[in-house]
Amino acid sequence: MRLFLCSHFAKVGAVLKDEAAGKNVVFIPTASIHESYKGYVGSARKLWKKMNAKIVEVEISSAPPDDIRKAFENADIIYFTGGNTFFLIDRIRRTGVDTLIQKHLAAGKLYVGESGGAIICAKELSYIMPMDKVPEDFSQKDYSGLNLIDFYVVPHYLCPPFTKCSRQILEEYPDLNIDAINNSEAIIVENGKKRRVSV
């Protein structure tokens, strides 16, 4: 299983430039759709294109199931933008995309998660509540994540406007295996081994 987890893709994504060239990316902006600021989605889109990747954009909360399935089948890289963690995991579970993620990662595809897209990889997500509100229409019985990693990502560590809440999470959960990354860092997980890169 291969994962690239970051806070701000536009800042660190160029690390993947050799791997991204000529590849198909399923680009999922779902976490961002109700956010007031979406600049990071546009800047990520721009960087993928600059790296000569071919983007197929799929908003999973509104796309037909067949379109989602085909986009995953044709993709070499699965990319989730940032945004609201709880909205994203809710829509992933409602649409069965969690099963697609497991299937395609098992086939060796690369998972790229930015902010909320990185957080959802953990086993359980309630730790991120100081940073992200749970939407009123959240429909899951618990706050389970995708359980792809054995640690917990705190993105935007000490970076405005998340300076206070990112610090608060580390103070509130001293016993949690937290990896806090700033906007210039990423975590690469490959074959169970984890390494950090910074730009």
Image: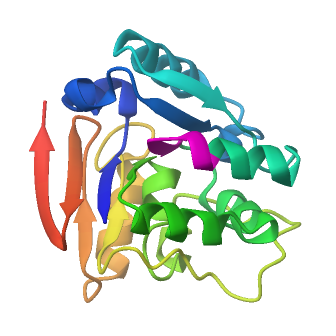
Give the x, y percent position of residue 36.
Answer: 71, 32
**Can the viewer see residue 177 in this picture?**
yes
Residue depicted at 33% across the width and 28% down the height: 20
Residue depicted at 39% across the width and 53% down the height: 109
Is residue 93 found left or right of 52 in the rendered image? Answer: right
Give the x, y percent position of residue 5.
Answer: 33, 51
Residue depicted at 85% across the width and 43% down the height: 63
Is residue 173 found left or right of 132 in the rendered image? Answer: left
Along the viewing direction, whichever of 107 and 149 lies nearer the viewer: 107
Along the viewing direction, whichever of 35 and 161 lies nearer the viewer: 35
Quarter the C terminus occupies = top left
Q: Is residue 130 magenta?
A: no
Give the vertical position of 9 relative to 21 (above or below).
below
Along the viewing direction, whichever of 167 and 10 lies nearer the viewer: 10
Is residue 18 found left or right of 11 in the rendered image? Answer: left
Give the x, y percent position of residue 196.
Answer: 12, 52
The magenta-colored residue range is 72-81
**Can the viewer see residue 83 in this picture?**
no
Along the viewing direction, whichever of 44 and 63 lies nearer the viewer: 63
Give the vertical position of 120 relative to 30 (above or below).
below
Give the vertical position of 60 relative to 125 (above or below).
above
